[in-house]
Amino acid sequence: MQNADAYYLYDEAVILENLRVLAQTFPNFSFFYSAKTNPNPHILNTLIKNDCGIDAASAGEVRLAVKHGLSPEKISYSAPGKTDEDIRYALPRSRIIADSIGELLRIDKIAGELGGKFEIGIRINPPFGMDSPFGVSSQFGIDYESLGEIPDLSNVQITSIHTHVQSQNLGWEILARYYENVLSLARSMKKEGFAIGTVNLGSGCGIVYDEETQSPLDMEALGAAVGKLTEKYADVSRSLIIEPGRYLVGKAGVFRTRVLDKKVSRGKTYLIASGGMNGFLRPAAANIAKLYGPVNRGAEPLISCEKPCGITVLNDSTETEVVTITGNLCSGFDVFARDITLPKAEVGDFIEFSNAGSYACTLSLREFASQPKVREFFRTVDGEVLE
């Protein structure tokens, strides 16, 4: 980590502990890691070694999963707007999830051209929300009410369904109700003649971003509810998948940036740091959102709440001061935090931001202003630091 003015550090021990908690909460479930959360190769290796599959949001992520040695049944490819080229590559290498009836027909046609009978899934836009009895229109999935419009298919068989309506939920009761609704939907589809063998319940398990206003998801209570549900819906609970990307890695990463300059402008103290929006966009995005009103509800995965991370100065100062922390880009929006109280920092000190393991480096503006790329490091359980 020497000679790096801004970098991410991911901790394998935290990831493995989070995986242990998930396995305890969701026994007999499979976990498919959402690669878009953080595709760092060391993170992928750790999760794959511990029997996680990959949820791919693009053909490129299917290629990434194949490169890491995963077999087709351990790769789920769910994304809207797949091209014929995407389908042709992914069909023999993953379980492809159709996002619309039109796409389903193209998949069936290409499957015929490939000469195989493929098992695939469909993404359902359900008739309910995460915490609502009503469904909404969506760019994702096939409306549940439209399933009767699916024609006979010659070259593929629908054997799985995928649902996902909301991420970053901290209420166990809400999640339990949602899971029951999905399992009930799967049961209904099975009665209607669909050969549903696998149910992917998507994501939903959240993490605490703001320690002052949020409480952790009660995994013990959620686990008890999940146990009852899998008994109640045993006929559709033989193969269940959860996509816990953020829960696995969100708190396993920190972002560190060096103070490059310090100045006072009309009574206000500014710390100019390396790697602003081009390094860690999430805090800047939350600050931009606040300029237009209160951040009452996030815009996932970019904005989760008003305070998306904790901020610490890595020095021994006992003095404090009110500062605004900015990046070093030529943009007035390149602001990590405004008017916050921190230990007094000097040029050369590092500032650390928490909650930087998921939707952090991947969302940042890495090409903006041709700045040096922020580096990523991975600390193994043995204490070795890899890049």
Image (cartoon, rainbow, N blue to C red):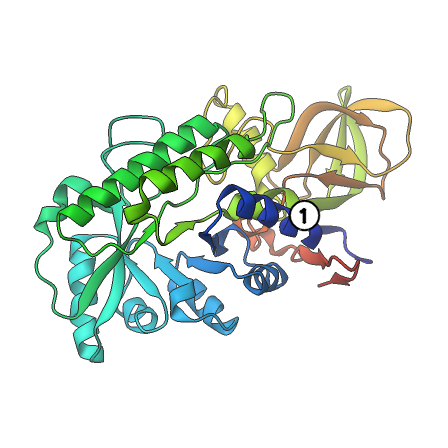
Q: Nearer the viewer, residue 206 or 200?
A: 200
The residue that label 1 is drawn on is 14
What is the x, y in percent for residue 360? 58, 46
Q: Quadrant of the C terminus?
A: bottom right
Q: Nearer the viewer, residue 150 or 136?
A: 150
Q: Residue at x 77, y 39 (%)?
A: 351
SS of the residue at dot 1? Answer: helix
What is the x, y in percent for residue 69? 50, 73
Q: Is residue 63 left or right of residue 330?
A: left
* Crowd around label 1: few <14 · some 14–19 · many ≥20 (10 Å): some
Report if residue 260 is visible in the image.
yes
State the image quarter where residue 346 is shown. top right
Q: Nearer the viewer, residue 267 or 260?
A: 260
What is the x, y in percent for residue 293? 48, 20
What is the x, y in percent for residue 37? 51, 50
Q: Residue at x 49, y 39 (%)?
A: 302
Q: Residue at x 56, y 35 (%)?
A: 207
